[in-house]
Amino acid sequence: MSDSLKKTARIVVLDRDTLPDDITLRAFSFPHELVAFGRTKPEEVAERIRDANIVITNKVPVRREAIGSASNLRLVAIAATGTDVVDVAACAERRIGVTNIRNYAVNTVPEHTFALILALRRSLVAYHDSVRAGRWQETGQFCYFDYPIRDLAGSTLGIIGDGVLGRAVAELGRAFGMKVLFSDYKGTTGMGPLYTPFEQVLRESDVITLHSPLMPSTRNMISTDEFAMMARRPLLINTARGGLVDEIALERALREGQVSGAGFDVVTAEPPPPDHPLMRLLDLPNFILTPHVAWASHEAVQGLADQLVDNIEAFERGQPTNMVAA
């Protein structure tokens, strides 16, 4: 057991409500006091973590000022993969550990990605809504053809992001008979024979799906110029991060027909305000917006919770895992 945690550890959870009620957070094996808040406002963070030894956060920012006032803090355990919610550099200066969750979403995100692709490629939502509105009875025949239906077999899937999720999506694409192109990172060339230039992926793909982290180099990597390159009017899918796509440019591209449809699970502002560009697209039959739930299958979230406890237990034993470098 690490010296810092030989005494009863005060563990503070800042946003327990970001995990479903049916998910079990396994009890820690070492002496501890657990304080769980459903939600925490940014201005409440410093006070709530002031006496904490371990802080668990999913989406509540833990910034330098709050870290500086938490004199007993030894570990920030992020209940997610993305680490931008924590000032990792400030933690490193204080020798505070930071851990994150890895590879828990290898099934749920690819499945959600293909749920969006299939729903859009076959106009499922549009047909469902039209049946509910009485269109089938209005036609007077056994079926009708108001919205396009396209097979995936024989089409081209462009994947931007070659991590574990991008590779899992590629496997599903190949199972559907799709040709898979992995994109070079935007602005680079020569990544090897397994990669296709970014601009070529935009030109040749029937479906483009994003699986990249949000960084300065990837922010708004799909914008007006990129939409203009999409010669095949592809579907655009984003289950990765809000901010990878210029949302105002997306609204214009959808309304002007530069893409045949879009399925998004992430937004730059979550929840988005009513006047957000993606909220304005909800009237279109070829746009689907889901509330950042691609990661949230029961199996995946329970795996996340189990890994979260494992990370903290490993730190307590002095054998830290999934540590985040400053």
Image (cartoon, rainbow, N blue to C red):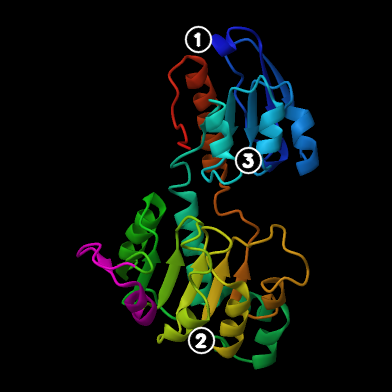
- Residue at image point 77% right, 65% down: 273
Identify the residue position indicated by label 3 in the image.
58
In space, the residues marked 2 and 3 are separated at their CA atoms by 36 Å
Boundaries of the magenta span: 188-204
Q: Residue at x 80, y 41 (%)?
A: 43
Res 162 label: none
79 and 26: which is toward the camera? 79
| Picture quadrant of residue 208 | bottom left
CA gap, disc 2 to disc 1? 58 Å
Q: Does dot 2 land on a helix, a strand or a loop?
A: loop
Find residue 166 and report its horizontal and vertical position in percent.
39, 57
Q: Earlier in the sequence, mark 2 or mark 3?
A: 3
Callout in the foreground (2, 1) = 1
Tag 2: amino acid: Gln
Q: Is any part of residue 149 visible from this angle?
A: no
Q: Amino acid at mark 3?
A: Asn
- Element under disc 3: loop
Q: Which residue reaches farthest left? A: 193
Q: Is residue 234 left or right of residue 247?
A: left
* Res 231 seen here: yes
Q: Which mark is residue 1?
A: 1
- Mark 2 — residue? 258
Circle 2 Cα neighbour tier, 10 Å, few/some/many (<14 / 14–19 / ≥20): some
Badge 3 local density, few (<14 within 10 Å), some, or many (20+)?
many
Q: What distance separates the C-alpha of mark 1 from that of mark 3?
A: 25 Å
- Residue 247 in the image, given as x and y percentages of width and height: 61, 72
- Describe the element under mark 1 as helix, strand or loop: loop
Q: Residue at x 66, y 32 (%)?
A: 67
Mark closer to the chain start, 1 or 3: 1
